[in-house]
Image (cartoon, rainbow, N blue to C red):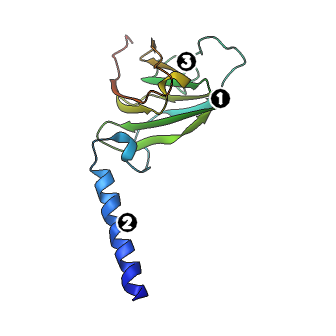
Amino acid sequence: MAIVVVLALIVLGVLSLVGSLKSDDPGAAPPGPDGSGQVTQTVSASSSPGAPSVDQTSAGTEIPTVFVECRADRCPLFVRVTGGDVVEDRDLSRGQQAVYSQPNLDVVLGDASTVYVELNGKARSPGKPGERQSFTVKREGRPG
């Protein structure tokens, strides 16, 4: 009997995993491998409380597709390549920054009022306290 229960739990777990991979909600997807060719970097914030500098990407002066800085004790963040692999699924701590340069990204902010966000170098308006926001961003072409 115990073997049947264990097998049933395994089957339910597999079905749940497959269902979450097919879900339209990016927040439901489990963590996976990073997309190829990505530039992802999380760094500590400077002591300056003003707008952060985005030239901390590994490309030097390249403007990232998405820049996020946590302005609260905990900032839930989920980022994945649109239609593809999960890039980030974690909570940032106060002052932590995350930079993403993939061309198309799905982003979910667990509480949009707790983060400073730039999309293609342009500041995004903060959300209301407790507001969950999800959006897709496409990298804009930059003059060479």
Measured as percent of width and height from the top left, residue 123 is found at: 47, 12
The crowd level at tag 1 (other Cα within 10 Å; few <14, some 14-19, many 20+) is: some
Q: How many marks?
A: 3
Q: Which mark is residue 94?
A: 1
Looking at the rendered image, the disc whose residue lies closer to the viewer, 2 or 3, is 2
> Could you tell me if the residues under marks 3 and 1 are in contact, i.e. CB atoms within 8 Å?
no
54 relative position to 125: left or right = right
Amino acid beneath label 3:
Val
Question: Residue placed at 38% from the left, 72% from the top?
Answer: 10
Q: Earlier in the sequence, mark 2 or mark 3?
A: 2
* Viewer-side residue, 3 vs 37: 3
Quadrant in the picture for residue 115: top right
Q: Which residue matches tag 3?
A: 54
96 relative position to 63: left or right = right
Callout 1: helix, strand or loop?
loop
Q: Could one spot residue 115 in this view of the protein?
A: no
Compared to 59, does 18 lie above or below?
Answer: below
Q: Could one spot residue 100 in this view of the protein?
A: yes
The crowd level at tag 2 (other Cα within 10 Å; few <14, some 14-19, many 20+) is: few
Q: Which mark is residue 13?
A: 2
The quarter of the image holding the C terminus is: top left
Measured as percent of width and height from the top left, residue 125 is found at: 45, 13
Quadrant in the picture for residue 82: top left
Give the distance between the C-alpha atoms of the residues marked 2 and 1, in whole angstroms: 34 Å
The crowd level at tag 3 (other Cα within 10 Å; few <14, some 14-19, many 20+) is: some
Compared to 50, does 133 lie above or below?
Answer: below
Amino acid beneath label 2:
Gly
Callout 3: helix, strand or loop?
loop
Give the distance between the C-alpha atoms of the residues marked 2 and 3, in whole angstroms: 41 Å
Amino acid beneath label 1:
Arg
Give the distance between the C-alpha atoms of the residues marked 3 and 1, in whole angstroms: 17 Å
* Viewer-side residue, 106 vs 40: 106
